[in-house]
Amino acid sequence: MENLYESLIICDAHCDTAERIVDEGFNIGERSNSGHVDIPRLIEGKVSVQVFACWIGKPGERSGYYSARAKQMINGLYTQFGKNFNIIHPVLNAKDIQNAMSSGKISAIIGIEGGQAIEDNLYLLDVFYGLGVRIMTIVWGSTNWADASREPERHNGLTNFGKSVIKEMNRLGMIVDVSHSSDKTAYDVLDVSTVPIIASHSSAQAICGHPRNVNDKLIKAISKARGVICVNFCPEFLDEDYWKGKKTNPPSIDKVIEHIEHIANVGGIDCVGIGSDYDGMGPAPIGLEDVSKLPNIARKLSERGYKDDDIAKIMGGNFLRLFNEICK
């Protein structure tokens, strides 16, 4: 196990730390006693690749707000990466990640969470790609062109414009993320996309029935398209009792392992990864209190008899395979 631990490439497909940077003036270079992610804890957790999502806010803001908010958060991330350039490096493609790993740096991928950021304009999608965005969660709440999982259906999935967004993301080399999407939206994405897609921070609905989670049929469909579902650590999405009952003690790491195992059993070992949603929740699971604890997942999987190669896929190999295929 120690040999595996030293050689693991750990990739976390989603954190919300960008919001802290912009709204709290948070310095990711210093260890914090609050939140879940900073550079000292990324180093402790031996994280090789971290996706920093720019959550742009709830639907209903004025025109222009969302694109401006996304740019503000992207700028905040680059400022922090610049201050800590000797440790963390923004990456755009597979070669960048390779170079970062060779020099012992953490790879930072910039994402946008919420398709409102493009303000119903494909040109802005190209602008964000030029700013280094390599993954977009197409909905957080429903947009004018796609339905979300926790809101009334407005479009029966993707509109024609929504389908053009997916095609343009494919053309650019930007990963399509269907976390927060309604089932119909996700299936429409699968129909349109010519490359694998991701659910960057979604857990298994069979374990916890929260509408944000992914059902078995969709797990199989994403897997068939060579996509990846990255398990979310948010207690409400992990444990049915916690979601519906009193928010007392959060579930433990064992519940995260249960979701990982279920997705692997339903869709195969090649379709599951980690998408913590750190800094986007309150208390994290016991045993996964912050990003420094991510190697505990590998230890738990090893204790359950998983092969080293399969553990490596779950911890980051599957995400990296998808990123390398799309972001060339």
Image (cartoon, rainbow, N blue to C red):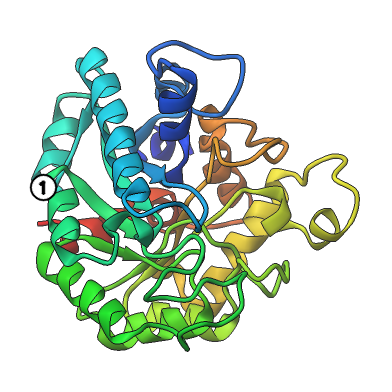
Q: Which amino acid lies under the numbered mark 1 shown in the image of this protein?
A: Gly
Point 59% across, 63% down: residue: 203
Residue 327 in the image: x percent, y percent?
15, 57
**Residue 110 lies in what quarter of the image?**
top left
Residue beneath the point at 57% across and 51% down:
301
Residue 11 showing in the rendered view = no
Furthest-front residue in this view: 62
Establish if 327 lies above or below 185: above
Q: Nearer the viewer, residue 225 or 165?
A: 165
Whether residue 87 sits left or right of residue 168 in the image: it is right
How crowded pointer 1 is (Cα within 10 Å; few <14, some 14-19, many 20+) is rated as few
Give the residue displayed 47% in from the left and 64% down from the top.
179
Image position of 258 with respect to 286: above or below: below
Q: Nearer the viewer, residue 275 or 175?
A: 175
Question: As displayed, is residue 191 above or below residue 305?
Answer: below
Q: Position of residue 1 (x, y in %)?
A: 48, 39
Instruction: Locate the C terminus and report the quarter of the image it occupies.
Output: bottom left
- Tell me if 227 is positioned left or right of 131 in this view: right
Instruction: Check disc 1 and report its element: helix, strand or loop.
Output: helix
Can you give x and y, in whole percent of width and height, for residue 190 in the image? 34, 83
Residue 10, image quadrant:
top left
Q: Which residue is mark 1?
A: 130
Of 37 and 182, which appears nearest the observer? Answer: 182
